[in-house]
Amino acid sequence: MTDGHWFLCFDLYGFRPMTAAHALPCIAIAGPTASGKTAAALALTERLAQRGQKAEIISVDSALVYKGMDIGTAKPTRDELAAVPHHLIDILDPLQAYSAAEFVRDTQKLVDEIRARQAIPLLVGGTMLYFKALTDGLDDMPAANPDVRAMLDAQAAELGWPAMHARLAQVDPVTAARLAPGDSQRIQRALEVWHVSGQPLSSFHTTRKKTGPAEQMGLATLFSLEPAERAWLHQRIALRFDLMLEQGFLDEVRSLRARGDLHLDLPSMRCVGYRQAWEVLDALEADPGKPLDMAGLRERGIASTRQLAKRQITWLRSMPQRRAIACDAPSAQQQLLDAALAAIEAAQQAAG
């Protein structure tokens, strides 16, 4: 136990030996955007294949579920998708929403199916709400109610989201205090819960479960790729956003706008980068003689991505069960590969 790696021989929740059903343990790789999660996961699948062990990747990313949103989400390439089976990518139209509860349900089913194929499930992504739902469980709050959401959307269109935020402060001051007045998605959800249940959203959070589905799934280790130096991550974010622009990100958003049925209040269009590109195109439409503000798009897109990364790192650091690896270290990927392989071997030995 002196080396700090004792937990690799047991499951994520402590000194509980894995069962035979978990001889193919789940390995999770989480991290902020641009931290190298995809490359690390693909390298791990390649190393496992060299040992004769199959693996499949389950995406833990609320943006990758959407079809037609490829460039701005940094979706794995066709070659990468073909090299290893991937799941929960391109499963929804951008008009649709995808909740944490749906993610947990789908992931549990996929883990069973992947194990039935004698493969190791790898959970890879940066949507921390999904990871928290797996490790901590979900609150027993009401499901989405389309009628209530439509009513709230209509009220917001008339009054504005800051006014809706003020209304939330009257019925759920705890939740309102942690939300910005423009955070339409979370304000809507909090008001929806109050309308449907008569209880504030904050009351559900006080009864959070201590463990979640990950325990039953046999999640051996949750690796967290975290930069020791933020400047390293900021540089990668800027380089990646520039590459997206070169690859035609703005044209991708133009195509989505041209559909005519999408708008900025949809979860898909709230994805980082898409909102900023949409607003630039809105400004151009309002004043066609005005030059396209590519510099402004780049600045706002990079800034919003950096803010996202900061939130992701904050979430990760609140998860005591994670095993952090400095993703900006030259040996980061090798460290992760060695530790993941050790975790898999230990789980298989424990399962007998």
Image (cartoon, rainbow, N blue to C red):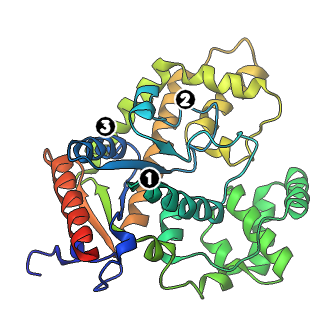
Q: Position of residue 42 (x, y in %)?
A: 32, 41
Q: Quadrant of residue 7?
A: bottom left
Rendered location of residue 87, percent (x, y) = 52, 46
Residue 297's tag is 2
**Residue name at image x 39 percent, y 55 percent:** 118
Mark 2 vs mark 1: give the one in front.
Answer: 1
Distance of mark 1 from mark 3, alpha carbons? 40 Å
Query: Which is nearer the eye, 262 or 47?
Result: 47
Q: Callout 3, which amino acid? A: Gln
Pointer 1 local density, CA inside 10 Å: few below 14, some 14–19, many at least 20: few
| Residue topped by disc 3 | 235
Q: Please identify the quarter of the rendering in which residue 194 is found.
A: bottom right
Question: In front: 245, or 4?
Answer: 4
- Asked if residue 186 can be seen in this view, the reply is yes
Quick one: SS at disc 1? Answer: loop
Residue 169 locus on image (x, y percent): 74, 75
Which three-letter amino acid code belongs to the residue tagged 2?
Leu
Q: Nearer the viewer, residue 145 or 58?
A: 58
Residue 242's x, y, as percent?
42, 25
Q: Residue at coordinates 75% horizontally, 59% vertically from top-left? A: 162
Confirm or deny contact between disc 1 and disc 3 (CB under 8 A): no
Front position among marks 2 and 3: 3
- Amino acid at dot 1: Arg
Sequence-wise, the earlier of marks 2 and 1 is 1
The residue labelled by disc 1 is: 117
Above or below for 147 versus 214:
above
